[in-house]
Image: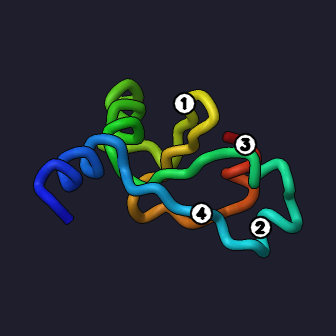
Amino acid sequence: MGYLAAIVQSLAGKRFDLPTQLTSRWPELGTLRYRRGGLPPRIGGWFLGQTTVVAITLGKTIFLAPGAQLDPELLLHE
């Protein structure tokens, strides 16, 4: 990974796809984009007086904190 790509990933998080077990059971989850890490969970946490939040949604993208589990209840909430 190049220097610029590493900076972008640290700011915007790393893109990933949900496992097919989740999208086959809850098809609505397959219409969204997912990223892990980045600034959005941290900024959300700062507004709540924490270091991070577990997840935050911006538009059609769900940003998950680095250690967050892929919990269907959380994803459906977002």
Q: How dense is the environment of label 2, judged by Cα within 10 Å: few (below 14), some, or many (20 and up)?
A: some
Which color mode does the image show? rainbow
Measured in 3D between alpha carbons, the distance from the residue under mark 1 to the one under mark 4, in whole angstroms, is 17 Å
Asked if the residue under mark 3 is in contact with the one under mark 2, i.e. CB atoms within 8 Å, the reply is: no
Please tell me whether mark 2 sits on a helix, a strand or a loop. helix
Residue 29 point in image, percent of width and height: 76, 52
Measured in 3D between alpha carbons, the distance from the residue under mark 2 to the one under mark 3, in whole angstroms, is 14 Å
| Residue that numbered label 4 is attached to | 17
Residue 60 point in image, percent of width and height: 63, 35
Q: Residue at x 75, y 72 (%)?
A: 20
Of the residues under marks 2 and 3, which one precedes in the sequence? Answer: 2
Query: Where is the C terminus found, in terms of image quarters?
Result: top right
Q: Which numbered marker is on residue 76?
A: none
Of the residues under marks 2 and 4, which one precedes in the sequence? Answer: 4
**Closer to the observer: label 2 or label 3?**
2
| Residue that numbered label 1 is attached to | 58
Looking at the picture, which amino acid does disc 1 mark? Leu
Please tell me whether mark 3 sits on a helix, a strand or a loop. helix
Q: Residue at x 20, y 65 (%)?
A: 1
**Closer to the observer: label 3 or label 1?**
1
Residue 25 point in image, percent of width and height: 88, 66
Q: How dense is the environment of label 1, judged by Cα within 10 Å: few (below 14), some, or many (20 and up)?
A: few
Looking at the picture, which amino acid does disc 3 mark? His
| Residue that numbered label 2 is attached to | 22
Q: How many numbered circles does the render carry?
A: 4
Measured in 3D between alpha carbons, the distance from the residue under mark 1 to the one under mark 2, in whole angstroms, is 21 Å
Q: Is residue 2 left or right of residue 41?
A: left
Measured in 3D between alpha carbons, the distance from the residue under mark 4 to the one under mark 3, in whole angstroms, is 18 Å
Please tell me whether mark 4 sits on a helix, a strand or a loop. loop
Q: Is residue 10 left or right of residue 36?
A: left
| Residue that numbered label 3 is attached to | 77
